[in-house]
Amino acid sequence: MSFIKQFFSLFEKTKGRNKLSKKKLHLVLDLDHTLLHSISVSKLSQKERYLIKEADSRRFDKSNPEYLMIKLRPFLHEFLKEANKLFTMHVYTMGSYVYAKNVLSLIDPDKIYFGDRVITKEKSPPNKKTLDLISADQRRVVIVDNTSSVWPQHKPNLLEIAKYIYFRDGMMKSKEESYAEKKIDESRSDGALSNVLKILQKAHTRFQELESDDLRLLIRDP
């Protein structure tokens, strides 16, 4: 291959890599009531106390003085695996760093999905979240969170997900039974995370095909 051909071949490869890097998309995920539900064991209702003897995805955070039980949302692992193929993922929680670290030791122990891209209340402004703490073009960031009010400046980026409540807590009506009390759970195949993943996948495909500069427009009309 001549020098000129080698030069242009290298130029095209570099241009392709630069185009891909410019297309890098980011996904910011909340933890509580979005990816999981946690509760102090002492607050379990009488009907839920059978869970103490069970294992699977209901885990104990023994480092917490209140001894938390953590229930992962159905389809969580599949969601993270597939979303990781399309986005650089971040965690943004109003919980403490210690709490986030313990939760992530359950859902991402090898730091495959989030690495050290974790923002907690210690770094965040009081009572709100901001994309100013994410090193990314905000036009190419999607947020998945169950609480829209904490994102006052970034509503266009937000995909609001239904709140996941597995255990009985203060947000439930007095006569309403929790998933745990009824011994059922949210659907895996047609639950909130599964549906959000479909929106993200479709928006990602359209972003690439349309060569769009603003992913936010595509999640509004997926």
Image (cartoon, rainbow, N blue to C red):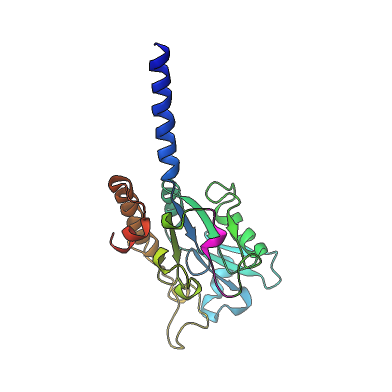
Residue 70 x, y percent position in the rendering: 56, 66
Classified by dominant secondary structure, the portion drawn in magenta counts as loop
Q: In the figure, residue 118 lies in which quadrant?
A: bottom right
Vertical placement of residue 11 versus 169, above or below? above
Q: Position of residue 28 (x, y in %)?
A: 49, 59
Q: Residue furthest front?
A: 4
Pinpoint residue 180: horizontal percent, then vertical percent: 47, 73
Quadrant of the snapshot with the N terminus: top left
Q: How many marks?
A: 0
On the image, the x and y values in percent for residue 131 come to 51, 62
Between 117 and 78, the residue placed more toward the observer is 117
Question: Is 101 situated above or below 210?
Answer: below
Question: 44 or 159: nearer the eye?
Answer: 159
At 54% from the left edge and 80% from the top edge, which residue is drawn?
Answer: 45
**Residue 27 part of the magenta segment:** no
Give the position of the C terminus as an image quadrant: bottom left
Q: Is residue 55 visible?
A: no
Q: Is residue 130 part of the magenta span, yes or no?
A: yes
Q: Quadrant of residue 218?
A: bottom left
Up-down relation of residue 15 to residue 54 (above or below): above
Instruction: Tell me: 72 left or right of 215.
Output: right
Q: Residue at x 33, y 46 (%)?
A: 208
The reply to whether residue 132 is in sight is: yes
Q: Which residues are magenta?
A: 127-135
